Amino acid sequence: MTAAEGEGEGETAVETIQREMTVFARRARASAGRMHPELSLVSYTLLGHLEERGGCRATDLAAHYALDKSTVSRQVAALERTGLIERRLDPEDHRVQVLHLTDTGREILAQVTESRRAAFRERLADWPEEDLQRFATYLTRYNAWIPAPKDRG
Amino acid sequence: MTAAEGEGEGETAVETIQREMTVFARRARASAGRMHPELSLVSYTLLGHLEERGGCRATDLAAHYALDKSTVSRQVAALERTGLIERRLDPEDHRVQVLHLTDTGREILAQVTESRRAAFRERLADWPEEDLQRFATYLTRYNAWIPAPKDRG
DNA sequence: TCGCTCTGGTTGCATAGTACAACTGGCCGC
DNA sequence: GCGGCCAGTTGTACTATGCAACCAGAGCGA
């Protein structure tokens, strides 16, 4: 492989996808912290999940996002400190804290979502609607994939 | 079709893209460290850049990846310690160190690339070739976008 | 009821990646 | 030669993260 493999001439589509996804992942990390002063990418997604589900447990968040429960615990603590979520003890199981967005949390989440959407709209402004829809479909399909269970020791 | 509009019932395609890209970014962060024991996502991309360019300066890497030069300096130091890259003093400018992949570095990079590609191939195994090519095109187009210069104070 | 085990959550510790600021050393124009 | 600029390193701090240890409530069985 010639060094020319860099930009895609001789690449298969899968290789291009791998390369571009890598680029995106790296950039996402770089820009994650700068989207909003008070809401990191992780916090944003946690809030989004809470909104979507209408409240859930920290353990559910950890499982859904493949994060350690300690990580979620700290994130949740931070979000509670800043008043974006609240914890309600489950009356049926006192181990459980059901997390809910506060009104402030809902508001901030909406703001950040709108801000992100605006950025995407700007970025995708030139795209024909048909391409946007296909791209959306592909991304959804891509993310929906569930890894085969590895047999690990 | 279905698939295109299927995602969120009331969502526009751009909103779906924003949401799915967010999902991807979060997962990428989560799984970045587990791709290879010795090569983080950042290190991988730095090595990739070196291979593509056939050697460059730390400052170039920092600029290209929007990283602080101190960050790059440490990454480079680590990569040199593990023998994946080497530094050559620029004879014309003794401030400059031109970074080059070592043979080991090239080898490891190839291995990791192949490992990543294999993961993508598995993930995309069911996709029709036409969809793969379109997805690749869309991702490339997406990443090629250059943000408008913000007037910042 | 007592104890064992499982589960949800917190906390202590360690690590990676990052930025900012201060610094060193080489290069260049005046 | 001096001041300024540039490449790179180092000190410091912070964030996100994981693992392990721990605590507390729940459930089950003897």
Image (cartoon, coloured by chain):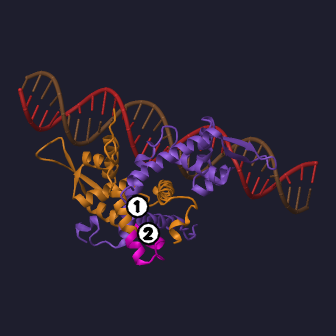
Chain colours: A purple, B orange, C red, D brown
Q: Secondary structure at mark 1?
A: helix
Residue B105 pos. (x, y %): 30, 60
Mark nearer the viewer, 2 or 1: 1
Residue ID for mark 2:
B120
- In the figure, is residue B9 to the left or right of B42? right
Q: Amino acid at mark 1?
A: Met
Q: Is residue A19 above or below residue D15?
A: below
The quarter of the image holding the C terminus of chain B is: top left
User: Does the segment drawn in magenta span residue B132?
Assistant: yes
Query: Label 2, label 1: how many angstroms apart (C-alpha)?
Result: 10 Å
User: Does the segment drawn in magenta span residue B67?
Assistant: no
Q: Amino acid at mark 2?
A: Phe
- In the figure, is residue C19 to the left or right of A54? left
Residues shaded magenta: B115-134
Let me know if residue B112 appears in the view.
Answer: no
Residue ID for mark 1:
A21
Badge 1: residue crowd in 10 Å (few <14, some 14–19, many ≥20): many
Let me know if residue A101 appears in the view.
Answer: yes
Residue A89 pos. (x, y %): 76, 44
